[in-house]
Amino acid sequence: MKKALVSAAVLILISYHMMAEAASVSYADSDLISEGTGNKNIVICGEKSTEILRVEISYFNAALQEEGMGIKKIKPKKSGCGILLSLPFENFGYYKTRIFTASSSIDAALVVLPKLEEAAFSKEYFVQTHLRKNGRTDYLISLARLIGFSGIRDQIIWNSGDEPKAENIKSEYIEKAHREGLKVLATITPAASGGCRNSWGPSCQEKAGLLSDFLEEAVKKYKNEVYAWEILNEPQNIKGMTISDYLSVLRIVADRARQLQTGNVSLIGCGGGWVAGGVLGDCIDAIQKKRVPVDAVSIHPYMGFELPEIGYHHKKYTDSSDYVNVKSLSERLLRVKQDGLNLWISEIGWPSISKYKSVPSGLFQAVALSHFYLMEKKYDLARLVNWYDLQDDGRDLNSKEQNFGLITAAVSPKPSLAALAVFLRMIGSKIWVNGSVSSTGVHLDEFYSHETGEKVFAYWREGAVAEKANERIDVPAGKYIKYDWDGRRSELYVNGKLSQEVGPLPVYLVRVN
């Protein structure tokens, strides 16, 4: 892997508009990931002409509107398989470019991020990796770290037919993530071939002891590398498994975990299990009632195509709003914290595709993601938040299930990657201290870092309508560094009333002392 990959935070999306014989970008030779502004090299294989190229560049503002930056003329050089061109970027941000070569036009989207400061997060921010399925283990682990995540969530496969020995447990990604400085949330998942993944019956229930043996061997092998162990993922989707069945298995495993002489073993229950991903609290209530000794419980509060400030109606949801959204979740699950049990969100995500026709392609995911993370920080809903997914599961752009990634199946970044990476840099290490919501749906929140003393204000508008509207932003007078949703940086002086264009994507104001 190139050294540039290790410290980089620029990702290049490549698709092709064929005009003649295919030209393609060489990922191995291009500056796919680099940190900071400056020139970014792209090697185009199959293209030999070194005539001056035209490059169109644009970006999206917080109101979801595309703004052009004009046309640049670049003189490429010969390089290995083709030509090399160096594109200058003087600011951070998510950029769309179209490069016109002699034989084709190539669309490239770049994400240029500011440096990630080494400040401790106020909670854990993880990402789902699916390394067994996606491959590219080294690349994806490095990418997760560069985006700013503190850890990853992935599977350890339990085959009930194998003897539970450490040598039968093969999850090389765990050691690699640990070396990269990432924590690992390992979800123990039955193998498809073992018969218990798709259907749960008496024979599977009898194998709970084998599962506890498996956990013991896994803990012995990875005791220093695994942050926590989650027992089964969404067990309600295993045909025939009831909450009672699950609690029986969980207790056997938990009791064994408490007996291990390998230090503290953090055990996570529920796995996002039961009605609506556990948001009704049915699995959590059962664990608390039966006093199963786990360290945390996890939910999967997916909201489909709905924005997190709105959510969706659930017929069994009986709080004041009758909607599953971030605010109602904080109210409904408050008792979990009050009882001293940690709540984790071990899966949350939105697809790139949207029901909002006015939202440019891919930006809906960035909007929903930004709203969720800012609101979750405000209500301090969970101790750990795991974004699902790092990479798309397929290439069908019309499939909801295949488009939850921050990068495409072709390893190309989306706007959501920029939005989440900038959130982690601006807000990840801070706590919410104050905020307001205007009658027009504009959120203004103040965040503070006890570690650095830094104050950051964030403002955004509810909904996903691509429009510009000026709003009064009440922040103290002084000098600020303004970062748009994607990191575009500018300076701002506030002497009195501040009026700003506010859109669905957030803007961050960092107070300069």
Image (spheres, rainbow, N blue to C red):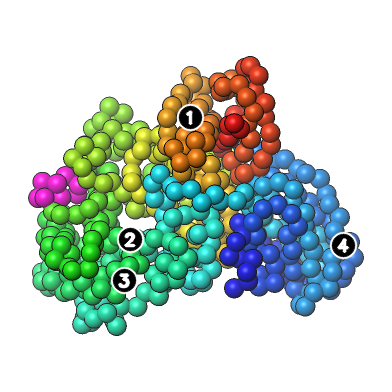
Disc sitting over residue 445 in the figure: 1
Badge 4 element: loop
Q: Count the marks: how many?
A: 4
Q: Residue furthest top?
A: 496
Question: Taking 333 as reference, is 451 left or right?
Answer: right
Inspect this view and state whether residue 63 appears.
no
User: Looking at the image, do the residues carrying marks 3 and 2 touch, with CB atoms under 8 Å apart?
Assistant: no
Q: Nearer the viewer, residue 1 or 289?
A: 1
x and y percentages locating residue 50 in the rendered image: 88, 68
Q: Nearer the viewer, residue 75 or 185?
A: 185
Q: CA distance from mark 4 to mark 2?
A: 49 Å
Looking at numbered disc 2 in the image, what kind of residue is underneath it? Tyr
Looking at numbered disc 4 in the image, what kind of residue is underneath it? Lys
At x 46% / y 23%, what residue is drawn?
Answer: 436
Q: Nearer the viewer, residue 470 or 20?
A: 470
Question: To which residue does mark 4 refer?
Answer: 75
Query: Majority secondary structure of the magenta segment?
Result: helix
Q: Earlier in the sequence, mark 4 or mark 1?
A: 4
Magenta stretch: give its range: 282-291
Figure quadrant of residue 6: bottom right
x and y percentages locating residue 305 in the rendered image: 44, 44
Q: Earlier in the sequence, mark 3 or mark 2?
A: 3
Mark in the foreground, 4 or 1: 1
Quarter of the image with the C terminus in it: top right
Query: How crowded is the residue under tag 3: few (<14 C-alpha within 10 Å), some, or many (20+)?
Result: some
User: Looking at the image, do the residues carrying marks 4 and 2 touch, with CB atoms under 8 Å apart?
Assistant: no
Disc sitting over residue 227 in the figure: 2
**Residue 404 vertical position relative to residue 215 in the rendered view, above or below:** above
Q: CA distance from mark 3 to mark 1?
A: 40 Å
Badge 3 element: helix
